[in-house]
Amino acid sequence: MKLDILAFGAHPDDVELGCAATIAKEISLGKKVGIIDLTRGELGTRGSAEIRDTEAANAAEILGISVRENLKFRDGFFINDEVHQREIIKMIRKYKPEIVLCNAIDDRHIDHAKGSKLVSDACFLSGLPKIETTLEGNVQEAWRPKLVYHYIQWKNIEPDFVVDVTGFMEIKMESILAYSSQFYNPKANEPETPITSKNFLESVKYRAQDLGRLIGTEYAEGFTVERCLAVNSLENLL
């Protein structure tokens, strides 16, 4: 299956928190979108890998994505080496996305920056024909995505561009709340974490509102880029 967009997250829920509204908007426009989770989030203070597997599947259904896979790298301990790069290259060549979305280049959780660089490096290497990979016994063709964008996570990194996601915040929040083990729940008896507060959940929405304010819309999501942005004409800008 060829995808238009393939979004990577170091943990289940990274993609939802970072760019679910953009994904929902692209799907509404007829794009095929997939998600690849690098780990099962097994080191998370709350829940378990099994619980998060179920939550990720529920979130995928809410968003209406075409496919979701988990590479089962070690949460907290995966590294940017050939072994891990090859596994991501296999996914890129399997789905042949035009656009790849990945973790923030700098963030509070060490896996986010690691995952960002790992996926970015694999996107480049995936385009080299002399790197041979096979999947299910078949030799894969080289494929390099045209664009690699990084969504914003915990830190308030200045975006290089923003996407108007007005009308898609409700589905974003619904996909986030599918991870009921991870976020604000006044009835939960598990330890508190930086993402379990009511303020954190509300911050997802008010950040999108603030980015929307800056471009004159209700909501927006921000991204950073690895190369200069280009437009066909000045009229392409909002």
Image (tube, helix red, strand yellow):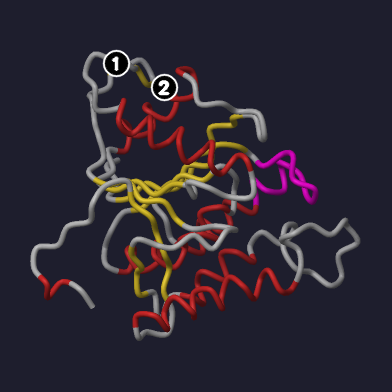
- Mark 1 Cα within 10 Å, few/some/many (few <14, many 20+)? few
Asked if residue 61 is positioned above or below residue 134 in the image, the reply reads: below
Q: Give the magenta range.
A: 41-54
Is residue 53 highlighted in magenta? yes
Asked if residue 168 is positioned above or below residue 232 in the image, the reply reads: below
Q: Amino acid at mark 2?
A: Arg
> Image quadrant of residue 73?
top right
**Closer to the camera in the image, 186 or 28:** 186
Asked if residue 151 is positioned above or below residue 105 in the image, the reply reads: below
| Count of numbered marks | 2
- Mark 2 → mark 1, Cα distance in angstroms: 9 Å
Q: Which residue is mark 1?
A: 131
Is the C-beta separation of discs 2 and 1 under 8 Å?
A: yes
Residue 201 x, y percent position in the rendering? 66, 71
Q: Amino acid at mark 1?
A: Ile
Q: Which residue is mark 2?
A: 86
Q: Report the side of 219 relative to 12 (left or right).
A: left
State the residue at coordinates (30%, 40%): 1
Q: Report the side of 82 relative to 98 (left or right).
A: right
Residue 140 x, y percent position in the rendering? 27, 22
